[in-house]
Amino acid sequence: MASKWWERAVFYQVYPRSFADSNGDGIGDLPGIIAKLDYLQWLGIGAIWLSPHYPSPQIDVGYDIADFTAVEPAYGTMDDFDRLLDAVHQRGMKLILDLVLNHTSEKHPWFLESRSSRDNPKRDWYIWRDGKEGTPPNNWQSEFGGSAWEYDNATGQWYYHYFLKEQPDLNWRNPEVKRAMFGAARFWLDKGVDGFRLDAISTLFEEKDFTPHTSHYSAVDALRSNWLHGIDGSTLSYDAILADLFKYQRNHTENFELIEELRRLVDEYEERFLVGETSDLRFLGKGDDRLHSIFDFDLLYQQNLSPDIVRKLLMHWGGKAPQGSRIGNTLNNHDQSRMAEHFAPDDLRRCRSAIAVTLFLEGIPFLYYGEEIGMRDYTIESLDELRDHVGHVYRRLRQEDGVGEDYILKELGTFSRDRCRTPMQWDRSPNAGFAPAGVRTWLPVHGNYLAGVNVADQTADAASLLHFYQKLIHIRSTNRALQTGTFADLDPTNEKCLVFLRETPAQRCLVIISFSPEEACFSLEAQGRLLFDGMQNGVPLTAGPYTLAPFGILIAEIEELGPVSNCSSFSAMV
């Protein structure tokens, strides 16, 4: 069976506000992205995931949408979008959009109508309820902190918001809402976009009776466990908190039914792709009736990467994705610490092991802009720099707990999502080439762009992390076994290296990934062609002793290899 384009592609998430500023206002835009497409093509990217580009008050940096069928004026015009889509396709790449189904902005015309009166025709497009003696309808929490209900003085009722109060939830049980939102999806599909990344799809429906929760956790616990990664020794499990605190607000069975309807709509178009912001396998359905892909967030949430950790995750996920679907592999995104910060805080070479895991395990690789040059988290130095509105909510809640401002700033510097959204670092010129000199960028540029963490310096250095990414992406893109092949662990007790085989009927590839700061020595009983080992590529692979550099990667196309079942052809001397 022929593979689909999304199985072959390496995806690259572009955060439009932070990628490239073409007009000198300190904000990234669509023309800026167009100007950088040749770079992405050189890197080997097969598909771009564009974070929200719609009109928005930017309370949640675009995830609070005020119009689902238009372009944010700060980013450009619809003509700019059409030029971007054409330019992407001309280069043989694909473009998927972020589609936010759960909520709108409070400034969306639908919500302005809905809150105008209790008898407005769009009142039932959102979730309105009476309170109880001046208190909210129940004790449900917002995942971003505080009550999930906001009181509206004009109409004397409360509206529900799973996220920020500026993001009221749509009422998906109203068929008019479904028609309008599906119409928005058709608008972009008719333009030729290649699919959607579906935001927050676990939260589309709530329990009908609004049963109060009995959890002893708070939304602040959820925030801390999700983004602080254990500050002050906290060991709270984010997944456990979500399952307990939000059990009536997430993963309702109607979510899956709605996704099946959306899949039928998308399948009316040729080879369009749906990936959901979830790790819930139920969203994959039978493999051909719900989503094409979900994310393995278990990888992203690990405190470090090692062969043992990766094997445990493989055992957890192995074989569970139904035929026709794929798991998305990623180690960072716009909500989490950058990969270099999280997995390679003390040794940038660890990034090499991490990207090899993302690219060569079974699944679809998703990269985040700037990870290919080792961009790191930015720590805000004052509250004046804080742009993440969730951070402002957290600050207020912590103030109510009696926590001092200095300590709150320390926490926000560790978990505010601003840390991973700073401008792309293109060169050593002022503002790292993101915006002209003298312009105040929407977030500060990380100062390490002057220390080689930029595209220009690393393009000129053949030994740079950027060139390492480019070489590995090219190898994946030109070898079908590394895209869709089966996976077999050849050395399941190795404590320093992952050693595995990816195989299709026409090709077998051996992959060795070292997680060790020391050299690893092997005795290889195999013949084939060496695709990569960091030093010599494209040369014959012969049997005999072999030394792998610290955090090194070996990839070979294998012609002769003994039985995989008992690993008789591969012996490790580590």
Image (cartoon, rainbow, N blue to C red):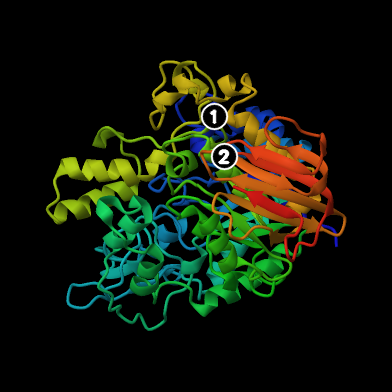
- Residue 443 screen position, x and y as percent: 39, 32
Measured in 3D between alpha carbons, the distance from the residue under mark 1 to the one under mark 2, in whole angstroms, is 32 Å
Residue at position x 58%, y 59% from top?
A: 493
Residue at position x 72%, y 37% from top?
A: 532
What residue sits right under mark 2 in the picture? 551
- Residue 319 screen position, x and y as percent: 66, 69
Question: With 6 as the anchor, is 246 left or right in this view?
Answer: left
- In the picture, the quarter occupied by the N terminus is bottom right
The kind of residue on which mark 1 rests is Ala
Residue at position x 70%, y 51% from top?
A: 194
Which is more foreground, mark 1 or mark 2?
A: 2
Between 248 and 30, the residue placed more toward the observer is 248
Name the secondary structure under disc 1.
Answer: loop
Crowding around mark 2 (Cα neighbors within 10 Å: few <14, some 14 to 19, many 20+) is many
Residue at position x 54%, y 24% from top?
A: 426
- Residue 204 screen position, x and y as percent: 49, 69
State which quadrant residue 534 falls in.
top right
State which quadrant residue 152 falls in.
bottom left
Q: Earlier in the sequence, mark 1 or mark 2?
A: 1
What residue sits right under mark 1 in the picture? 20
Q: Which residue occupies the extreme left position in the image?
A: 402
Name the secondary structure under disc 2.
Answer: loop
Q: Is residue 178 above or below residue 445?
A: below
- Residue 368 screen position, x and y as percent: 55, 42
State which quadrant residue 115 falls in.
bottom left
Q: Which mark, by number, is residue 186? A: none
Crowding around mark 1 (Cα neighbors within 10 Å: few <14, some 14 to 19, many 20+) is many
Camera sees residue 195: no
The kind of residue on which mark 2 rests is Phe
Total numbered labels: 2
